Image (cartoon, grey):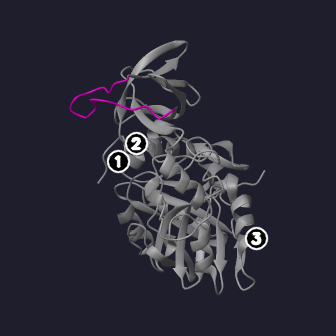
Amino acid sequence: MPASHLDSLHRELGARFVDFGGWSMPVQYEGVLAEHGAVRETVGVFDVSHLGRVRVTGPGATDLIGRLFCNDITRIEPGRAQYTMLLNDRGGVVDDIIVWWLGEDDLIVMPNGVNIDDVAGVLRREAPGAVSIEGNREATTLLAVQGPTANDLLEDILGWRPRRFRVDSVQVDGVDFPAAGTGYTGERGGELMVPNEAAEQVMRALLDGGAVPCGLGSRDLLRLEMGYPLWGQDLDEDTSPLEADLGWVVDWDHDFIGKKALRRQSRKGVDKSQVAFTMKSRRIPRAGYRLRAGGSEGIVTSGNISPILGTGIGLGYLSPPPVFHRFSQAKGDPEPAVEVEIRGEWEQVSLASTPFIEKD
């Protein structure tokens, strides 16, 4: 099984490992709650090298990204990053993706690790001859530095202060690499695509500067508190961005794969809709638990206890989409009541909006 270039350092730090997207990756070090607290209160560093990195370069590279993905890359400019999606002909989400636009016809497409072959395959199939599609996951280490003091730490260590969704070039001992003000926790910070030969030096410097090593367990809890979707749970090839309450990712003013299907769905209405909710008790809503609201049924797709809120939070889907009456944050629970089944018992929950917690 492939592993991060920093595998031996993770073992030195006492990491526990999990198979994530076919890669052996740290799931936790000290513990999920301690690592969650470090990111919310100070700064943590994640090795997320299981994520895809596909370099798309050459004349026509930007046009290729523009006609494949549902967000419009031309709405931004070189030196910026964009959240987008590759859809199928039914409008389902093949993958949700971050694109770093380094320079003219020079972009890095960053799919989820489990989908890298599918995304890279579409890019290669659709690319004109002048466009090069090259993966560099094995040659680089992807580090995410996140937390209220992350920007200060990165400036101290690397001389680079992240700006939200901005892409820059960073240098360490003569080695240049791209970095961006992106992340999956809702906190300040950025992500570094470090060549393997410099990765351990950078990681140790971050740790010496006070960053806490964090695993994918805390990362999942942090992203859920922000209401960020996880592909394979909250998104899949049978779920559209409209059903997932992610219509803002779709730019209708350009052509992309799945646009006709989304147009039909926009006119006729969606078959299911995502709901966010909080528990009224300390019980934990787990992925796969049944949901219902009046005549609508579905399942929880993500759920856990929020250490910030001190209660369970969850995302799920209901079909057909329920129509809620008399609901506002001030008036309390909506009608019909939303319920989750836990160990054979139906428990009413409170409808919520995302993010579950407020961040600056």
| Residue identified by numbered label 3 | 125
Badge 1: how crowded within 10 Å, few (<14), some, or many (20+)?
few
* Image-quadrant location for residue 308: top left
Q: Is residue 242 visible?
A: no
| Highlighted range, magenta | 320-336
Q: Does residue 332 appear left or right of residue 255 in this picture?
A: left
Horizontal relation, residue 175 to residue 83: left or right = right
Residue 287 drawn above or below residue 264: above
Query: Is residue 21 shown above or below 346?
Result: below
Q: Nearer the viewer, mark 2 or mark 3?
A: 3
Residue 201 sits above or below residue 19 on the image: below
The amino acid type found where label 2 is placed reads Gly
Task: Give the image location of residue 280, x and y in percent.
Answer: 36, 22
Q: Position of residue 82 (x, y in %)?
A: 48, 67
**Residue that carries the numbered disc 1 in the rendered image:** 41
Classed neighbour count for the residue bearing mark 3: other residues with Cα under 10 Å, few (<14), some (14–19), many (≥20): few
Q: Identify the residue at horizontal 54%, vertical 63% (top origin).
A: 70
| Circle 3 SS class | helix
The answer to if 57 sits in the magenta stretch is no
Q: Secondary structure at mark 2?
A: helix
Q: Are marks 1 and 2 in contact (CB under 8 Å)?
A: yes
Real-space CA distance between mark 2 and mark 3, rounded to the nearest whole angstrom: 44 Å
Are the two marked residues, 2 and 3, in contact with CB atoms closer than 8 angstroms? no
Name the residue at 40% across, 19% down.
348
Gap in Å between the C-alphas at discs 1 and 3? 45 Å
How many C-alpha atoms fall within 10 Å of the one at disc 2: few (<14), some, or many (≥20)?
A: some
Question: Which residue is at the front of the view, 33 or 266?
Answer: 266
Quadrant placement of the C terminus: bottom left
Measured in 3D between alpha carbons, the distance from the residue under mark 1 to the one under mark 2, in whole angstroms, is 6 Å
Q: Amino acid at mark 1?
A: Glu
